[in-house]
Amino acid sequence: VIALTKTHVYVASASTCAITSRCGQLKIVDIANPASPRIISQLLLSRAAPPFAGTATSPVAAKSILYRNGYVYLGLEQTPTLSGQEFNRIDVRDPLNPLWVNGFRVGRTINDITVREGRVYLATNARAVADVLVLDVLGMQEIGRVTLPPLQPTSSFGYAHVLGLFDTELHIGRSYISNADEWVIADVTHPSTYTSRNIGTTLSPASARALILRETQALLVTSNKLEVWDRSDSDDPHLISSHTIRGDVTDAVCVGNVVYVTSNEAGAGVLTKISAP
């Protein structure tokens, strides 16, 4: 998973190689010369001190990442100890020397991160606690949560997977769940108030893999298709079109009016290019 600026790519690494400085959960790539990108620094989070990101022999993999104003927000998979901090704030104003600032323990994997006006929203696997935790970035403390029914999914079903913010709307894309909707639009000022839509039926299970919000549309990328929704009325979004994607979708990004979707098919990577409406 990556976060991108004009000159650098910030990579959340899932590598679990031997414990060396070259196996950092955060990798920074210089792309000032697009023809010759190069890794210029890495950060391997401490396991013996905060954020306690793993055991002495095994680091915890990074799962999600966001860049804002000289800082990287890095989400990890669930740490194996009670003192581990899955959410981490890292100073990258000097890309050659990334510095861990502080962290917060969630107790579960962080699947996605978004931030606005000093608040960070974390999509987590902590269904019994909350689908989305809201933190004060500077104070690094919980200030709110969004919990969606049902509270106890079976296995890994129904977890908050991707997030998007538009005005006062918090969009939550969940993994497939048979008895609830996978796409939820919550009011950030009143998180218990939300609209939802079913994007994965029992006959055609699908999980949300990416959310791209435009002025009046939501491009919702599931595990097997791209759906275009009219969200001019957030209380009643409706489907405009649907496009099947080859393989198992992993992520998507929109550049101008073109959507690029990555997927895996029979062990090979596939890049699908779709012109957005």
Image (cartoon, helix red, strand yellow):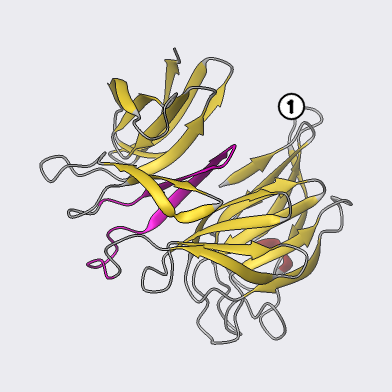
Question: 30 or 123, which is in the foreground?
Answer: 123
Residue at image position (64%, 64%) is: 135
Q: Percent x, y for residue 212?
A: 50, 32
236 is higher (above) or lower (below) than 50: above
Q: Percent x, y for residue 21?
A: 73, 67
Q: Disc 1 marks which residue?
A: 34
Q: Percent x, y for residue 215?
A: 54, 23
* Whether residue 204 is visible: yes
Query: Dot 1, crowdedness within 10 Å: few (<14), some or many (≥20)?
Result: few
Q: Percent x, y for residue 92?
A: 82, 53
Q: Quadrant of residue 205?
A: top left
- Label total for image: 1
Residue at image position (32%, 52%) is: 175
| Amino acid type at image mark 1 | Pro
Farthest residue to the right: give it: 94
SS of the residue under disc 1: loop
Q: Which residues are magenta?
A: 152-176
Question: 24 or 92, which is in the foreground?
Answer: 92
Question: 238 or 161, which is in the foreground?
Answer: 238
